Image (tube, helix red, strand yellow):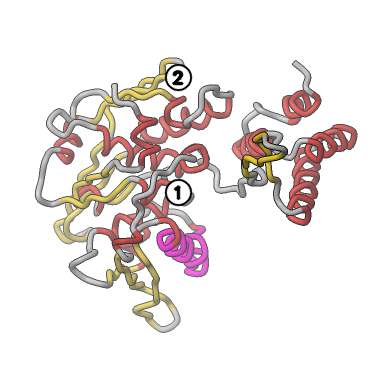
Amino acid sequence: MKDLIVNISSGKQKVRRSNHFINAEDRKTLTPLAQKVLLYFFTVVDRSKPEDMVTFDIKDLYGIKKLNRSHYVNVDKACRLLSESSLKFTTGEPGKHFKGKYIPIFSEVNIDGCMVSFEFNQKFSKLLTPSDNYTDYMFQNINEMRSTFSMRVYELLKQGVGRYKTREFTVVELKKLLAIDGKPTYNRFAMLKNRVLDVACREITEKSDLNATWEISKKVKRTVVAVKFHMELKDQTLELDTVRQDITSNVSFESQAEIEEEPKTTQASINFGGSNLNATIVPPQNDFDDKVEKLKLRLEEIGVSKATIAAAVKKYRTFPTWKIWPEVNAVRMAVKDGNKFPNKHTLRKFILGEE
């Protein structure tokens, strides 16, 4: 079994995907975590034996040694979505010798404790065998993206880098590629702009090896019918070669809710009276006060009692490096996803140090 944690944290793994696969229409919108798990399989699968089962440890995926229930719930949800995922390949137009083919991606998905195993569908595995018609990129280029749409648009743009500077899609075509053509939410172009186009181009530019922008390329009366993306490769000397260590924030969160971070601290060695002393340098007081206020607000939103909030604030001020934010974020995500655990009661026990 391949060591997934080493591969992800090194950021050196290359994703190679058939262009037929990239240009196929997704039939189900995946969560960001499910999309990353899917893409990562393209870095670990043996292309000479694509039908073999690939296995990984959930702890390796998250990059931590101890899991809580929310980790298992999120991975289970991602696996369920992947097991139901298929691709649609079409030619022609409906009513004009239209042809469509639907291919499930996986034939089997197994979860056994903290181990997850995937087996690609035999027909789909043919798309994984060596071919001249493919697009490849470093996994790290999508690893920090929080939107599934950003990852999909990145691949579509990456196909053309080095050959052309723009890529144009009709609105109908783009919606099909992103599996949102049947969602009424995106009937209004303003929603497509705000939730897909703007987010995708911002994340691609900020987190990958490409610069990306978009513009309206065609209107019929007042209706937008086509958009054009502009893409260019960033300076190669600045391309993402560095090792990404913080994979917990990069991989594990499938919710797009705001994730609060702990205040950054710095370890320093100070020479005092001829002896070296280790010290922790905390952020400026104004920044820390803002974090304290935000902690109070988040705990109130979760429904924690005033007495527990007071205890949390006191402990946080006394120990600025206290690992409270991962616990708060886990509860917020559970609430957002409709999960019963973790909850405000487990959070209260953590704050008060109860078993």
Query: Is residue 245 in the magenta section?
Result: no
- Please state, as top left, top right, bottom left or bottom right, where the C terminus lies in the image: top right
Residue 212 visible: yes
Q: Residue furthest right?
A: 307
The residue at which mark 1 appears reads as: 144
Residue 114's disc is 2
Residue located farthest toward the front when viewing the structure as drawn: 274
**Dividing the image into 4 quarters, which one contains the N terminus?**
top left
Residue 338 x, y percent position in the rendering:
62, 35
Residue 25 is tagged as none
Along the viewing direction, whichever of 161 and 88 lies nearer the viewer: 161
Instruction: Give the x, y percent position of residue 322.
Output: 71, 34
Q: For mark 2, give the secondary structure.
A: loop
Residue 331 visible in image = no
| Main secondary structure of the magenta stretch | helix
Place residue 317 in its image quadrant. top right
Q: Amino acid at mark 1?
A: Glu
Judge the density around disc 1: few (<14), some (14-19), many (≥20) Cα neighbours within 10 Å. many
Residue 42 on image: x %, y %:
26, 38
Q: Where on the picture, by quarter, is residue 119?
A: top left
The mark closer to the camera, 1 or 2, is 1
Whether 188 is among the magenta residues is yes
